Amino acid sequence: MKILVTGSTGKLGSALLNQLESSDYQIKLTSRSKPERIVNGEWVYSDLLSGEGLEEAVKDVDVIIHAATSPVKHSKVVEVSGFKEFLGKMQHIKNMIYPSIVGIDEIPFNYYKQKLKAEELLRNSSIPNTIVRSTQFHHFIENIFLSKPFFSRYIVPGNFKFQSVDVNEFAKYLIGLVEKDPQGRIADFAGPEIVTLKEMAEQKIKINNESNKVLSIALPGKLSKSFSDGKNTNPLRKIGGTTFEEYLRDKVK
């Protein structure tokens, strides 16, 4: 079986590559830039923005794990119009595995709206598919909210809640879907615990022996309320095993 991993230089794509390299699958990778290391498999250039290379990327593959995404720039093109063009080239695919995000149908964030449109495109297409939503990755939370203190303080928005997961655990879960029949939208993959962003910042301070403090500022609006209400979590689907605290401890080993 030949598997195509899109977005092969991203965090999820890299995690997929690391685990697939020791498998018996034939591996094909595609992205705009070439991965630094390819032990087993081939790489081809493709760009969802321009459409270049998409047909070559899907050629002779059986299953696609679509890790390509663009949360900051060109989201509408990459997630929707470029994705639609991509779907038009994969009529031979046995299963399109699409990683999505918990809460995209309830959180008023533009990137999430585009991901929801992409899900709808895939569901309404003739392509056999499996859609699985995950909660945010540990590294994403740290990089976006806790990357740098200001004036010896981590400034966090309100009472935001997260149920973050380890990217490697989610990658393993996605690979486990390869041998299964297409299932459409399946149950979410969520982290082992729900904690506030303030608690996450306090964990980082303790583990790194920092002198920083945490300043929590409540923000108005529907977007802030949706994260405070935990719309990005799923307490019934605590599948991941690595907590955010354990992720932080592993980084300092």
Image (cartoon, helix red, strand yellow):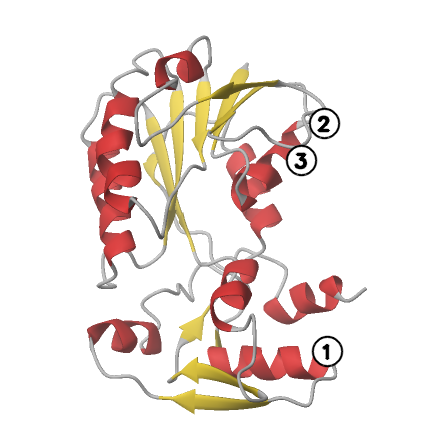
Q: Which residue is mark 1?
A: 208
Q: Position of residue 128 (x, y in %)?
A: 32, 23
The residue drawn where x is 44% and y is 58% is 135
Residue at x 30%, y 27% (from the top left corner): 50
**Residue at the limit of the structure toward the front, as seen here:** 151
Residue depth check, mark 2 versus mark 1: number of the one nearer the observer? 1
- Tell which residue pokes out farthest to the left in this image: 124
| Quarter of the image that includes the C terminus | bottom right
Disc 3 crowd rating (10 Å Cα; few below 14, some 14-19, many 20+) is: some
Is residue 3 or residue 36 the one in the foreground?
Answer: 36
Identify the image quadrant of the N terminus: top right
x, y (%) of residue 95?
Answer: 39, 23
Q: Residue type at mark 3: give it.
A: Asn
What percent of the width, then of the height, locates residue 199?
Answer: 54, 82
219 to 105, vertically: above or below: below
Q: Which residue is mark 3?
A: 18
Front label number (3 vs 1) = 1
Residue under numbered circle 2: 22
Residue closest to the eye, 67 or 45: 45
Residue at 25% in and 61% down: 109
Does label 2 or label 1 sit earlier along the sequence? 2
Answer with left or right where residue 240 lies relative to residue 117: right
Which label sits on residue 37?
A: none
Identified by mark 1, the residue type is Asn
- Contact (CB < 8 A) between labels 3 and 1? no
Q: CA distance from mark 2 to mark 3?
A: 8 Å
Q: Secondary structure at mark 3?
A: helix
Furthest residue toward top: 60
Give the class, few, some or many, for how many residues have Cα within 10 Å of label 1's Cα (few <14, many ≥20). Answer: few
Identified at 61% across, 41% down, the residue is 15
Q: CA distance from mark 3 to mark 1?
A: 28 Å
Which amino acid type is shown beneath numbered disc 2?
Answer: Ser
